Image (tube, helix red, strand yellow):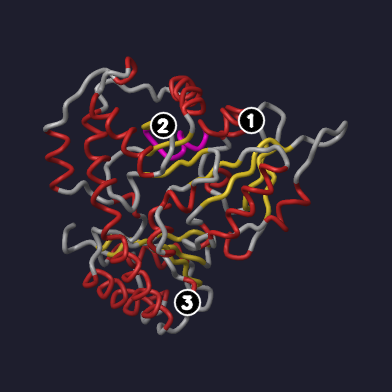
Amino acid sequence: MSESVVDLRSDTVTKPTAAMRRAMAEAEVGDDVYREDPTVNRLEARAAEIFEREAGLFVPSGTMGNQTAIKVHTQPGREVICEERAHIVNHEMAMMAAFSGVLARTIRAEDGILSWGLIAPQVRGRSDHRARTGLVEIENSSNLAGGSVYPPAVADEIVDRTHAAGLPVHLDGARIFNAGVALGRRPAELTRKFDSVMFCLSKGLGAPVGSMLVGSKEFIEEARLVRKMLGGGMRQAGVLAAAGRVALEDSPKRLHFDHDNARFLAEGLAEIPGIQIDPAKVVTNILFLDVSETSLTSFEISKRLAAKGVLANGVTPTTMRMVTHYDVDRAGCERALMVLREVLSVPARAVVV
């Protein structure tokens, strides 16, 4: 990363490492639609092995992975129960309605963490008036809830009770490796009860492109067809899968640095007048800060920061999000705090951006 820019907008902005670039350049390739790309095949097999599943599927994006799973699990006219801030509701372009013909039944939960007690009243069976529940979905870690993670017992109870009700459960595990590091648990331990799991290679793991779906052989065979429907049938995709394989093997080992940097940022932010944040709630690499007492909107602060080489997005007029990743080191975090103090110390009308 250039020393002139500290990019805290997301962990999606990471650049591929030298090892990833070498792997891409040397990748053995074939036509993946014919299932002849050996590098893709090895990535899918390795993902399945790590998650202790029968099969895996390489998809271009997390959104495609989630929406593929929803399509396989549901029927048109059903509802998908999820938390109010779920990625599938807020950042996937209403695709579950447009493609699968299903609606979201959202529930607000503290820190984005659902429980069976919250879900149970929303589960609907056959009715002449109400849509039937078709799927329960949870997100771990919960992006828009500040990177919070599910206690394993809570997630297991949700899956067990949902299965007892005759329904499948999908996990949006875009950052499940971050959750695993925070909890000190292997991804397979956290996810084995779910009917399907999506996780991203292109966020904290740092690959340039791609996500994975894992599940039973039967589920993945159906998902492969849906991927093709969505335009995700790629050809010599091994050049992408090669970077994903490096990310899968190497990147989880260093995610704790990102978590440490996020906590360092949160502790520094808590000391800045006008900023409200609870560092104790920062458990992975995502943090949200309340700027309502600064006399500036988050978007104005974002512009001021960008002018000084620090990138961070406003989410609402009073809230900003920052995300740590391997392209921002401790010095970058220190610089971000210094610049934020500077821009908040200047009266609004005195700044021209």
Residue 299 locus on image (x, y percent): 44, 62
| For marks 2 and 1 on the same chain, the one whose residue lies earlier in the sequence | 2
Using the numbered discs, state the Cα–Cα distance from disc 2 to disc 1 in whole angstroms: 20 Å
Q: Name the residue under label 2.
A: 55
Helix, strand or loop at mark 3: helix
Q: In this view, does 64 lie above or below 189?
A: above
Q: In which quarter of the image is the C terminus?
A: bottom left
- Tell me: 133 left or right of 112: right
Q: In this view, does 241 lie above or below 189?
A: above
Helix, strand or loop at mark 1: loop
Q: Which amino acid lies under the numbered mark 2 shown in the image of this protein?
A: Ala
Residue 332 locus on image (x, y percent): 24, 69
Q: Mark 3 points at which residue?
A: 280
- Tell me: 161 left or right of 171: right
Residue 125 locus on image (x, y percent): 80, 37
Using the numbered discs, state the Cα–Cα distance from disc 3 to disc 1 in whole angstroms: 38 Å
Q: Which amino acid lies under the numbered mark 3 shown in the image of this protein?
A: Ala
Q: Residue at x 15, y 41 (%)?
A: 21
In the picture, the disc for residue 74 is 1
Are the two marked residues, 2 and 1, in contact with CB atoms closer than 8 angstroms? no
